[in-house]
Amino acid sequence: MENKDQLDQESNQATVEMTSEETNSNDKPVSSEESQEAKLEAEIAELKEKYLRLYSDFENFRKRTAKERIELIKTASEDVLKDLIPVVDDFERSIKASDNESDAVKIKEGNQLIYHKLVRILESKGLKAMEDLVGKSFNPDTQEAITQIPAPNEELKGSVIDVVEKGYTLGEKVVRFAKVVTGA
């Protein structure tokens, strides 16, 4: 089978060579159609080359942006973590100081200072606690009902009775749904 294909290719090649020799031996002037065809073939080759270069440039761009995106994801939390390190330091100092301190009020004040510092850092990064939800109607888009209890009065049916865990938003996106108890 391979021999047959090889013979066919050699025969086709010989035919092409004979045809080109006949054309050259006739020494006819090149017709305008042939020159037009040569121009079009040259233009096609040029367009193919431009397409390949453009495609290569696009592939390089795609690979580069994918690599940058991966690096960005890896380092996106770096800024937040750098801001949280001083809070960790404050907690370590608080733990050391509480070993020697017997006044619970001072320990509580120190812990509250650290808590407020942490909350300010998180708010500066766009994280916000959801507003007080008690007494408002249940919203499944921002809240997760963990249980229902009988409502103490008619007005609290279908409303939030208690908040077990606060919910948080980052910009307009809910990061953590508020876990609430609703009235039935």
Image (cartoon, rainbow, N blue to C red):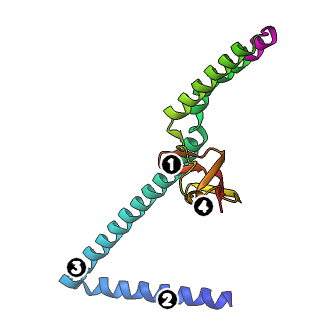
CA neighbours of label 1 inside 10 A, class few (<14), some (14 to 19), many (20+): few
Cα separation, mark 1 vs mark 2, equals 46 Å
Percent across and percent down for residue 177 are: 61, 51
Give the residue at mark 2.
12
Query: For residue 36, which numbered disc appears in the image?
Result: 3
Give the residue at mark 1.
64
Q: Main secondary structure of the magenta part?
A: helix
On screen, residue 85 versus residue 94, left or right, reads left
Cα separation, mark 3 vs mark 1, equals 42 Å
Residue bounds of the magenta highlight: 94-102
Amino acid type, mark 2: Asn
Cα separation, mark 4 vs mark 1, equals 55 Å
**Quick one: SS at disc 4?**
loop
Percent across and percent down for residue 106 are: 69, 13
Q: Quadrant of the C terminus?
A: bottom right
Q: Mark 1 touching mark 2, by CB under 8 A?
A: no
Instruction: State which mark lies toward you, 4 or 1.
Output: 4
Q: Mark 3 touching mark 1, by CB under 8 A?
A: no
Q: Residue at x 61, y 30 (%)?
A: 81
Q: Quadrant of residue 44?
A: bottom left
Instruction: Point out the tag, 1 or 2, that comes first from the N-terminus.
Output: 2
Give the residue at mark 4.
157
In this view, the residue in front, 184 or 139, is 184
